[in-house]
Image: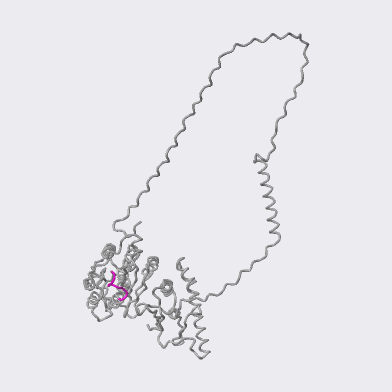
Amino acid sequence: MQRITRIAFDSNNPDIISQLEQYHSLLLLLKPHLTERTFSILATPKLIDNQQYVGWYTDLEGQPLLLDNIVNQSQKDEIIQTLQTRLNDIETAINLMPLSNEEQNLVSMWLPKIKSSSNLIYVINNEPVIVNTFQEDVQPEPAPIVAPTPFWRWWHFLLLALFLVGLLGLLWYLFCPLAKPKIVPAEPVSTPVISAPVEEKQPEPAPVPATKPQEPEPTVVPEPIAKSEPAPTPAPVPKVKNPPNCITKEEMKKDSNPSKMVMVFDNSLSMTVTLNEPPQEVEKYFQYMSYGYGRNMSEQDRIAYEKRMTRLPTRLSSSKNVATSSIDKIQQNIDISLVTLTSCPAADVSPFYNYTNRGTLKRKIKRLTPTAAGGGGTPLYSGLQKASQMLDGVKRDDYILIISDGEDNCSKNNICTLANYIASQKPRLKINIVDIAGEHKIDCIANATGGKVYIAQSPKDMIKQMNKAVSSLKINRPTCQ
C-alpha cells in the first residue's frame, strides 16, 4: 500500500475527527460489497506523524498524478468517464445492500461528499482515486413554488366560518342564563264578592295595657376566631445513595489535564480461532495453517476441520464483546484511542474519542475483521510504540490496555527493550495486558511499567479478567448522581 499524499490534520477539532471516523466506518461498510477495482477509487486515510497529518493510501501501484495536471484532454475525459462509472457502481451496490437505519443515514450523508467536486482526484496508471477533503459543495436550493389557492377553497372556508358562528350563537342562547329574558308570572286578578249588608256595631274601647318593665337586651358574645392550622411540612426528599468512590461532575470539570487511555487490539488472523478447543489443538491448527499440515485430508474433512476450529465463540468475538462493555465502565472524563493490530508492517491508529463519541468507538471495534492482505501478522511492536507516543505519562497518569493472543511477528526489534525505554521516559504510563493465549510471551511489557497480566482462555475468563484489567488501572470510577 503506497501513500498518495498527506493533508494537515487538526486533532483538536472534534468535527474533523468525527468526519474521519465516519469515513472509516463507510469504507468498512462498503468494502465487502464492491469489487476490488470499484473500491480502489476510495483512498484510505490514516493518521501519521503524531496525528499532525492524514496520510491517504491506496493499493494501486504507480506514480500518483493530480487529474487537473493532465494536459491531454482526451485522456482526461476518459478518466472522468471511468470515475463516473465507478461512482455509479457504488450507488448500484448501495441500493442492493441490506442496511440498518444507522447505516442508511451514514451512506446518505457521505455519498454526496464522495461525489463532491471539492475532493482531490489523483490518477495512478489511468485509474482515478478520490482523496476526500471533508468539504462539501453546498448548492443553493431553488425557492419553492407556491401554487395559488383556488377561489372555491376560500368560499368553502367562508361557509364553514358562517356555520360555526351560527352554531356558537345557538349554543349561547340555549345555555347562557344572561341571554334568556326573565319571565315574571302575572298576578292573579281578584274578583269582588258581593255580600248582604251587615249592621254596624260601635267599636268597644280598647283596653289600656299595663306597663311592664323594659327587659335588658341580651349581650351578644362574639364567637372565638378559629386559629388557622399550620401548613403540613413536606416529606423530606430521599437522598440518592451514591456508589463508593464515585467521581463528581464538579471534580471532573476541575481536572484540566485528565488521563487518557489507548486500547491496543489484536485483529490478526489468529484471533479467529475458537475458545472451545484446548491449547494443544489450537497449536495444531496454527501448524496446519502455517505449513499446510493436513494435505492428505479430503476437501470435505478440511472444511469440517476449519469450521470446527473457527466456531463461535472465537478469540475475536469474545474480545470484541468484553472490550466494548469495558469501555462503558471507564470514567466519562477519560478519552480513549484504538490501536489496531491487523497486518504487517505497522499498526493502525485512531483519534481519541471523548465520552459522547464512545458509541462510534464501539462500532469500530465491532466491525474489525482480520485480513490476509500483506501476509497478515501481529505488529505489536509498532502498536506499542505508537500508543506510547500518543500519551503523556509524565505530567499525568496515562494507560495502555493490550488485548492480544501472542507476540509480535512483524518486527525483529526486541519489544521488552522498547517497554523498558517507555518506562524510563514515561514513568506515569501504566500498561496492563489481557493475554488470550496464556503463553506469557509479552509479560515484560506489563512488568516494566508496573502493570499486570491477566490470562483469559474462555468466554467467562474474558469478562472476569477484562474487568480486573480495567479496575486495576483505577479509571473506572462511577459518576456521582
Quarter containing the C terminus? bottom left
In percent of width and height, residue 114 lies at 48, 77
412 in relation to 219, above or below:
below
219 in relation to 302, above or below:
above
Q: Residue furthest bottom?
A: 72
Q: Is residue 403 visible?
A: no
- State the predominant SS element of the stretch in magenta: loop
Quarter containing the N terminus? bottom left
Task: Indicate yes or no whether the magenta region holds residue 393.
Answer: yes
Residue at 75% across, 24% down: 189
Residue at 51% across, 89% down: 75
Task: Indicate yes or no whether the magenta region holds residue 303.
Answer: no
On the picture, is 41 further left or further right than 480?
Answer: right
On the picture, is 93 further left or further right than 144?
Answer: left
Q: How many marks?
A: 0
On the picture, is 259 further left or further right than 126?
Answer: left
- Residues drawn in magenta: 389-396
In percent of width and height, residue 269 lies at 31, 74
On the image, which quarter does residue 281 sit in? Answer: bottom left
Q: Is residue 477 visible?
A: yes
In percent of width and height, residue 260 lies at 32, 69
